[in-house]
Amino acid sequence: MFADTTFVPARGLSMGHVITIYAWARGRIDLGLPAPEIRLVRIDTESQVRADCYWQPNRQACRTLLCLHGLEGSSEKHYMRGLAHKALRRGWNVVLLNQRNCGGTEHLTPGLYHSGLTADPMAVIRALVTAESLGRFSVVGYSLGGNLAIKLAGELPDHPDLPVVSVAAVCPTIDLALCSDALDWRQNLLYQLNFLKGLKARMRRKAVAFPGRYDLTPLDAIRTIRQFDDTYTAPSHGFGTAARYYELASGIRVAGRITVPALIIAAQDDPFVPVSQYQGAEVRDNPHVRVSLQRHGGHCGFVGRRTADSDGYWAEEAAIDFVSETNPR
């Protein structure tokens, strides 16, 4: 049963920067997950995405959890595997989606991914419903994947064929412009550089995989995520500018339309995802959206003390508790 409990950080992890970096850099023990079944799902004539699927013995009779990673993440991120481990133990099927180009899938599409590309998870859900006769889905997303989860939930009224009954989002970037601005703060230089390192490396791999598709001349001069989005992400998807992309791809634009149970887990000490975005009327006035705002946790950290019943990854447990309550057997 989901309870809006208070997160208590492990000793020494009560500062936002510390717990964020600790969770990112910490080696996590082998969770004992079985080998997934790899599914390639076609999105359009040019593009496919890879989904790592973990099935229960009678998959058609079980709920299915779709997990969405953050910027420059993949199905191998520790929180994705943590979610899979916890959900499998509770009888869920689990699908870990690698967004376009992520998890070594650059060759599967000539295009790029962006923070509001809900068409891809929607296509994956439809493909699995058709191929496996699956009935009920819940979605959990982290950071950028959390924005996707919230935006997908807000778009569900336009897609009644999608059997998504609840969503949970951990530190979701639902106001992309606000989060991009926060990355420009001096204290967040490390995070900005880390994201840019991954994005630039990906563009170089894309240029090799699809010669002539992308002009890398401006790449070395890019110093911020907004500059990268202005140069590559926004034009490649027809947004034109980063400002227009942020406006149209932000989950906050459609949060008021959410009609399924939705949970947002956030931390006041998140270094670069300001919690003010969860306090606007779009979120606050929607009775279907619940915000669990914690004093500590950093960005997608939430590492607490281990006990006999818990590995200490509080947000994973809270998200699984919530979707289990709102998507009962």
Image: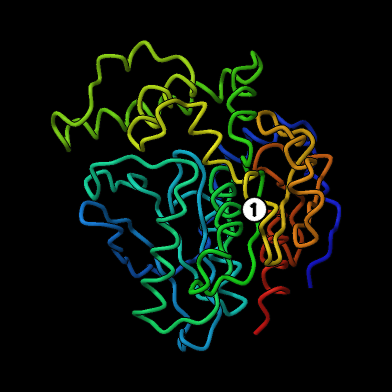
Q: Residue furthest top?
A: 221
Q: Quadrant of residue 182?
A: top right
Helix, strand or loop status at disc 1: strand
Camera-side residue of 279 and 293: 279
Residue in view at x 60 percent, y 59 percent: 153
In the rendered image, residue 191, in percent from the top left (x then y), is placed at 56, 25
Residue in view at x 51 percent, y 82 percent: 135
Camera-side residue of 222 and 10: 222
Q: Is residue 70 above or below residue 55?
A: above
On screen, residue 140 versus residue 290, left or right, reads left
In the rendered image, residue 92, in percent from the top left (x then y), is placed at 56, 76
Q: Quadrant of residue 219?
A: top left
Q: Residue furthest left?
A: 211
Q: Is residue 324 above or below residue 235?
A: below
Q: Amino acid at mark 1?
A: Ala
Residue in view at x 31 percent, y 66 percent: 39
Q: Quadrant of residue 189?
A: top right
The residue singled out by tag 1 in the image is 169
On screen, residue 82 versus residue 214, left or right, reads right
Residue in view at x 57 percent, y 53 percent: 141
In the rendered image, residue 91, in percent from the top left (x then y), is placed at 58, 80
On screen, residue 182 versus residue 219, left or right, reads right
Count neighbours of disc 1 (C-alpha within 10 A) and say few if under 14, some if 14 to 19, many if 20 or more.
many
Color style of the picture: rainbow
Give the position of the N terminus as an image quadrant: bottom right
